[in-house]
Image: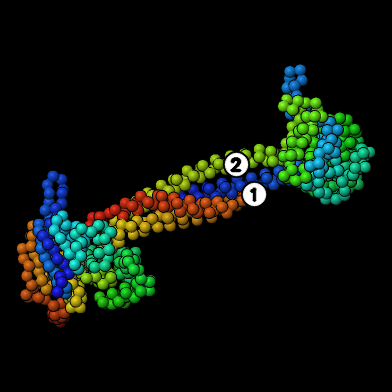
Amino acid sequence: MRTLLTMLGMIIGVGAVIASVSITNGAKSQVEAQIAALGENMLLVFPGSFSSSGARLGWGNWHSLQLDDALAIQDELPGVVAVSPENSTRVQVIAGNQNWNTHIQGESPEYLQIRQWSLAEGEMFDNTQVRTAAKVCVIGKTVADQLFLDQDPLGQMIRVGDVPCQIIGLLTSKGLSPLGQDQDDVVIVPFTTELKRIDREDWLDVILVQAVSQAAMPIVQQEITSLLIQRHNLKADGSRDFVVRSQQDIAQAATTTASVMGVLLAGVAAVSLVVGGIGIMNIMLVSVTERTREIGIRMAVGARGGDILIQFLIEAVTLSLIGGAIGIVGGIGVSKLVASLTHWPTLTPVVWIVIASLSSGLIGIISGFYPAWKASKLDPIEALRYE
Amino acid sequence: MKPVIQLEAIRKVYQSGEVDVHAVQGVTLDIQPGEFVAIMGSSGSGKSTLMNMIGCLDRPTSGHYRLDGIDVSTLDRDALADIRNEKIGFVFQGFNLLSRTTALENVEMPMLYHHGRLSAREHQERATRSLELVGLAARADHHPNQLSGGQQQRVAIARALVNQPSLLLADEPTGNLDSQTSIEIMGVFQKLNDQGITIIMVTHELDIARYTKRMVILRDGKVITDQPVLDRLYADDELLELRQAQQAVKLA
């Protein structure tokens, strides 16, 4: 019973470490997976801020990106595989007696390739349909569910604003974005259709660019910057009316939160490990006092100070290792429980199990050393006389 | 023959407060192999202090102590521990067994600290042989609290013998036992002594001292009497007599 209470500090400490690491790691890996699902080797070109008669507008508020910019990026830069000039808006879509307010995106046929997205049914529009600004669309899972319930939407007509479009493809479900938006709540039309028929604008909200490889991304990012500076007649070192971001930039921002959480939890866990170590030291001191006579007997029959030291050290380390082991199992249990209750994914890295085991052993040595040293310095005559 | 123990002008002074306590004041004593010596004296006579020094638990303030020809009065803690392990077997008044382990494991314990370690099997064999010597092999797997006082003291004697020491040191070995069990324990000592084991025993009971071969009496830290036991008792005879007396009481 006392042994169990002694180990409780270690159990809670190690358990907290393992649980917190599992949860933050799971969150991190989920965010990373979501970011990766944004697209492969993807760069995003956003319109930039711009001062208009002294009032500075934020990112994305200036219509500085033109369709020609997107076409130039595609045609002039060798490291670019695919480009999709995106312009989007929210409108009411109507099918039969159902209607739904959703996100309309004008894209190029390469959009699905850039986003690593596939169709569940039907097909994507092609370049001919882009050239003719055809009234066709590809819809996301959420839109299909809302407008068609159980019916097959493929081939049906929907009215996007006041433009009737035929559904030629149905997207697979992509779930929530890292920022919590429903990525399936979308209708994708050729960018020409969006710009000319639905939104009647001539600027782009964002240009999606796919680089040839991961390694090529910094170069492509640089090339896009130079190209747009030249096209927009800007000074090389002056203010810019656009910004180029890679998905790594976005991923970094998103995982920072998870990392900060992790550091915080690790701090709490470290404190409870120290408390656990103090608990072990305390109980070992009590144990040395209680067993003074035993120490005397062992010394009388020829145990050296070092033998006694090692005996008590081994006891302390065993205590803390068992505590650590229970803590590891408990921590994994807690993280699994959290996973099943909240549907957060959790992931226990093996390296952390090793770290937890080693540190509980180390805590055993550190907190056991003083009591063991005290025991080894006892005078055998005094110890034998102890009642 | 070379003596097992050679004490030369041994002194021990304790500094307690401002007054120095002279516990042992110049004891010179030789003990030959195969002797069975009782060290006697009232409390405060210095017999415990002398015993601690003979047992290498303590070092004399001055004088020389040779055990098996080795001058142990200048050795350090670890070296003394090794001497205790290899050359001395202790038997205490309070038995001093480890309560959480079996009789056999108690007997094995000194071998854990022996250099030139043996295998676990050899440990067990030697501990069992040692228990046989004191007639307790059948109780090898009992814990101390399952044994009587006499049996516990036999386990302690077995433990003292297991490393084949040159010397068996017993500190009031019968102090916690009734008179019949005391005689039985003295019988064990006499049997061991007959096999050639040197025994030194501290006691304040004259009856018990009469089972030994030589009596050394201390007073105020000095030897005042050192003489052979003339009217020696033999445990076997005494036990026989005791049983006859008991039977006579029952018959009556």
Please give the residue where the numbered disc 1 appears in the rendered image.
A345
Residue A240, percent from left and from top: 75, 27
What's the residue at 74%, 43% (across, down)? Answer: A216
Q: What number is the disc on residue A11?
A: none
Query: Of A370 and B172, which appears nearest the observer?
Result: A370
Please give the residue where the numbered disc 2 appears in the rendered image.
A259
Chain identity of mark 1: A
Instruction: Determine whether A282 is above or below A243 in the image.
Output: below
* Residue most extreme to the right: A132
Q: Quadrant of residue A221?
A: top right
Q: Earlier in the sequence, mark 2 or mark 1?
A: 2
Q: How many C-alpha atoms fall within 10 Å of the one at disc 1: few (<14), some, or many (≥20)?
A: some
* Residue most extreme to the top: A53
Residue B14, percent from left and from top: 15, 51
Instruction: Determine whether B70 is above or below A127 in the image.
Output: below
Residue A262, percent from left and from top: 57, 43
Query: Of A325 and B220, which appears nearest the observer?
Result: B220
State whether residue B224 appears in this view: yes
Alpha carbon of mark 2 to alpha carbon of mark 1: how far?
Answer: 16 Å
Q: Please check whether the numbered discs 2 and 1 fall on a single chain.
A: yes
What's the residue at 23%, 59% (across, down)? Answer: B75
Q: Is residue B125 left or right of residue B237?
A: right
| Quadrant location of the C terminus of chain A in the rendered image | bottom left
Name the image colouring: rainbow
Query: Of A302 and B74, which appears nearest the observer?
Result: B74
State whether residue B205 appears in this view: no
Q: In the image, what residue type sits under mark 1?
A: Pro
Instruction: Determine whether A34 is above or below B72 in the image.
Output: above
Q: In the image, what residue type sits under mark 2?
A: Ser
